[in-house]
Image: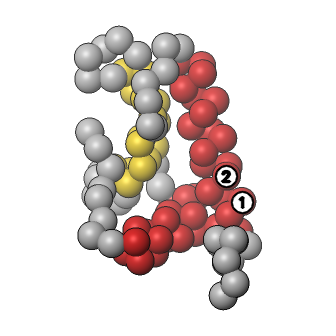
Amino acid sequence: MAARTYRNYGECRAAFERLCTDIGKLPGAVHHTAEGSGWVWRLRDGTGGAVAVSARAYERHSTCQAAYERFRALLAELGSGGVIPWGEAE
């Protein structure tokens, strides 16, 4: 299952900013791949739609779980500042 796609950069950027500020409300978990030969993580919205997925499958559950937790922590850190530091003058 893939995450959402966006028509343009602005739409994608706005969705990422929402993801950062809403991370505490988004359920997610580690799952077997569709083929059953590895592990992936997914974040879901309130309707169950995937809003973020791991970029690759992991061999070990523990490695996937650690990557998932780091991703959530990074989003929470970015979202807690109120403004995402995009590295450009605003």
Residue sitting at x 29%, y 44%: 2
Colour scheme in the image? secondary structure
Residue 62: where, in percent of width, then height? 60, 19
Where is residue 77? Give x, y as percent: 71, 59
Label 1 belongs to which residue?
Answer: 77
Is residue 22 something that shows in the picture? no
**Which residue is under mark 2?**
74
Work out which quarter of the rendered image holds the N terminus and state it: top left
Q: Is residue 52 left or right of residue 69?
A: left
Is residue 72 placed above or below 30 in the rendered structure?
below
Q: Are marks 2 and 1 in contact (CB under 8 Å)?
A: yes
Instruction: Give the quarter of the image for residue 36.
Output: top left
Q: Residue furthest bottom?
A: 90
Q: Secondary structure at mark 1?
A: helix
Residue 86: name its quadrant.
bottom right
| Tag 2 secondary structure | helix
**Residue under the image location 67 percent in, 49 percent down:** 73
Q: Residue at 26% across / 23% down in the picture?
A: 34
Of the residues shown, which amino acid type is indicated by label 2?
A: Leu
Q: Is residue 88 left or right of residue 53?
A: right
